[in-house]
Amino acid sequence: MGAQAPKTINYMDSNNFISKSLRQEHLKKISGLRYEDEEKYELQSEIRNLLKKNNASLIAHYYTDPSIQDLALDTNGCVADSLDMAKFGAITESDTLVVCGVKFMGETAKILSPKKTVLMPTLEATCSLDLGCKVEDLQLLKDQHPDRKVIVYANTSAEVKSIADWVVTSSIALDVMDRLVSEGKKFIWAPDKHLGNYIQKETGADMIIWEGSCVVHEEFKLEGIMNLKYLHSDALILAHPECPDKVLNISDFVGSTSQILNFAKKTDNLKFIIATDAGIFHQLTLQNPNKEFFQAPTSGKGATCISCAYCPWMGMNDLFKLRDTLVNKNNEISLEENILDKAQKSVKRMIDFV
Ligand code: 13P
Ligand code: SF4
């Protein structure tokens, strides 16, 4: 069994990270009144033209606004999980990548394609895992354990990636760790404790695990899901590995966003309970019109961000900001050269592993 890390940071209460104004903006957006239909089509058409004019590709995550996902697919961009977003950015021939997601995704695109211009609709869209893992704190832990390899989740800053041996996303974490465990290595894992505990359980790795979590997935709880399962006993439970272990233990399938989508598509089952951000329902329902999907309930208090399964930072991406970014060429990702070079080594290890 691996040792548990000393508590280097406080328990991740989402209220520490999500400001009142962000919460209000978020609640307005998830009420479904983001744009009138006509306004949406006009914005989409304007963005389509701007993408063409700037030889730019739109790269969106499954948790973003459905109208952005539709546009990305419509313009030969991509909608994907964080690993495939990174890979697409590196292989596309476009000079400019417009990344709709959270900041670490834009930074990863820049790390892999330093010569391309990487824009984002907003640079304020971050992630509780990234916020909860400061490079100085991780460096301290690393200094205390020079015999351990440092493996970090992609949901971290470029600075954190620059001091890591490996970067992994949820879709590849188990495969990479299986390989490293077979080579007799010991690890520091940061920052998601639930994914870390899941990997430790599955691979038997000797890991010191950081005390971070995702504000969205942290809120899925066993009791609520079991109540829903009681109502739909024939539904399979599909969960993202950022969920707490009690949820993962009762799940029929655990995987990244892309892996959840693939599983839902290939299995014959017709009903599913989904324990991940509700943004994924757009592709789930488009790809499986004959199947039923139920959102796993959260334990958050009413009228707060944690009462719904929507990431408040992913929700900051909208068509207005996307259009403005392409018009003004602002919100560009830029990274210090030495940080980029070091981070590139650990990110490339992951890409080359695939
Ligand atoms: P995926 O790599 O599975 O898309 O996950 C990214 C993420 O931020 C999940 O909350
Ligand atoms: Fe980060 Fe969670 Fe949002 Fe994913 S859903 S970007 S892990 S806060």
Image (cartoon, helix red, strand yellow):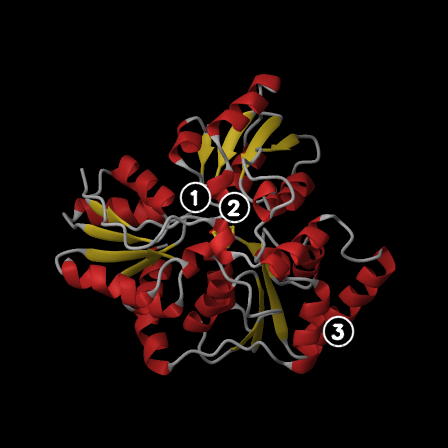
Q: Counting residues from the N terminus, which is met first, the one under dot 1 or under dot 2?
A: 2
**Which residue was labeled with disc 3?**
49
Q: Secondary structure at mark 2?
A: loop
Dividing the picture into quadrants, the one containing residue 118 is bottom right
**Residue 346 occupies quadrant:** bottom left
Q: Describe the element under mark 3 as helix, strand or loop.
A: helix
Instruction: Determine contact: label 1, label 2, CB under 8 Å.
Output: yes
Separation (CA) of disc 2 from disc 3: 34 Å
Pair 3/1: label in front: 1
Q: Is mark 1 within 8 Å of ligand 1?
A: yes
Q: Residue at x 50, y 68 (%)?
A: 106
Which circle marks residue 216 in the picture?
Answer: 2
* Picture layout, residue 47 above or below residue 191: below
Left or right? Give the position of 323 relative to 124: right
- Say the numbered circle drawn on residue 18: none
Query: Cα distance, mark 3 to mark 1?
Result: 37 Å
Closest to the observer, 72 or 251 = 251
Quadrant the C terminus occupies? bottom left
Q: Which mark is residue 242?
A: 1
Q: Residue at x 32, y 57 (%)?
A: 152
**Three-letter code, disc 2:** Val
Quadrant into which the N terminus falls: top left
Residue lying at 22% horizontally and 38% vertically, measured from the top left: 204
**If you read the primary sequence from the N terminus, does the residue marked by circle 3 or circle 1 appear first?**
3
Q: Amino acid at mark 3?
A: Asn
Distance between the alpha carbons at the discs numbered 1 and 2: 9 Å
Q: Does residue 52 appear to the left or right of 187 in the view shown?
A: right
Viewer-proximal residue among 66 and 220:
220
- Of 41 and 15, nearer the camera is 15
Q: Is mark 2 within 8 Å of ligand 2?
A: yes
Say what secondary structure mark 1 lies in. loop
Q: Is residue 135 visible?
A: yes
